[in-house]
Image: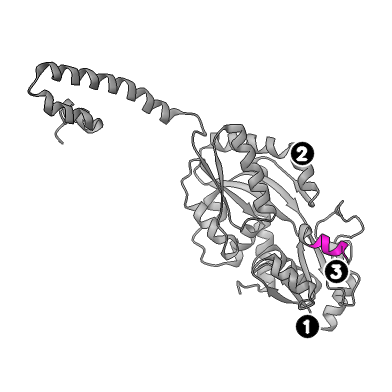
Amino acid sequence: MPRSLPQSSLLHSAFPWIARRSDAARSCPAAAGAVLAAALVAVTVAAPIAVQAQSAPYPNRQIRYIVPFAPGGPTDAISRAIGTRLAESWGQPVVVDNRPGAGGNIGTEIAAKSPADGYTLFSGTVANAINHSLFPGLTFDFVRDFAPVTMTYVTGLILAVHPSLPVRSVKELIALARKRPGELTYSSSGVGGTPHMSGELFNTLAGVKMLHVPYKGSAPAMIDLLGGQVQLTFDNMLSVLPQVKAGKLRGLAVTLTERSPLVPDLPTVAEAGLKGFEVRSWNGVVVPTGTPREIIARLNTEIVRILRAPDLREKFAAQGIELTPGTPEEFAAFLRADIAKWAKVIQVSGAKPE
């Protein structure tokens, strides 16, 4: 049995200043009594404070919100909007931590290894559903290692071509691609992203072979498309729409199942002749698996309230983004379906992390 420390030793370890004063008190009985009285007061005051700190309601300190992409773009924008309003509501700082790289895998791995205590949020995206099958040997499993809180938004992409390409519809693009296999090129912001996989899905459903040209981000991909170095792209509305309106690109279709109110004249890809084609870029909040249910419930309630605010919905709708908050169970079901969809596309297309 380990030997118990005497009460004086416990006091000395908890309050070092007592030990220092005790040395002086040994030669003076009156001083010794004063030291003991001070120690009792210190213990009496400190004990309730320690208990209160441990039992303080969530949240009682800073929250970290990991975003697996660089600042700018819809993922970063929605995360900062949520973080700002959470901080205002809860009175605790919410720090957005951008950790880009490897198609979102770097930030995802950091979040997966974080404590499951409610103080790490992660901004999950469609890239996580794609990477689940595209990248073998990941050190994390997005379904196993994360618990859904709520979906935040869905948005579509625009299929756009350089004006020099002699096509004005999806059917004409398919016909040209079949006539010139392996010659047409499409740009993307990187391997495994939604633009890349949109092209792979298009190739698979249309029975064509357009070549993928990946770039390090949307900006350089758009520069080369505008310059005619590549011939077409699938990209988010925020990037493509201004170029279409300026006549620098020709929009052919949107990738959702319904037309977008921002570009009502553009048909959907399926409507324009490629049945079964649908691509949704999405975002959602998740936390490390093991986070207490009551914390997930509180996060869900507050974030759903934020996403239903009329001013926020209007702001994102102007960018072609629909805010879609819901329950953790709804998000989990959506996630399973999206992972299965992209697994099939990757298997059939033979897409690889180039």
Alpha carbon of mark 1 to alpha carbon of mark 3: how far? 22 Å
Relative to 12, does residue 229 appear above or below in the rendering? below
What kind of element bears circle 2?
helix
**Quick one: label 1, few (<14), some, or many (20+) residues within 10 Å?**
some
Alpha carbon of mark 2 to alpha carbon of mark 3: how far? 32 Å
* Quadrant (top left, top right, bottom left, bottom right) of the N terminus: top left
Amino acid type of the residue tagged 1 in the rendering: Glu
What span is colored magenta in the figure?
Answer: 240-246
What kind of element bears circle 3?
loop
The residue at which mark 3 appears reads as 248
The residue at which mark 2 appears reads as 311
Amino acid type of the residue tagged 2 in the rendering: Asp
Q: Which mark is residue 98?
A: none
The residue at which mark 1 appears reads as 183
Residue 350 is covered by the magenta coloring: no
| Position of residue 141 measured from the top left corner of the image (x, y, whole percent) | 53, 57
Residue 241 is covered by the magenta coloring: yes
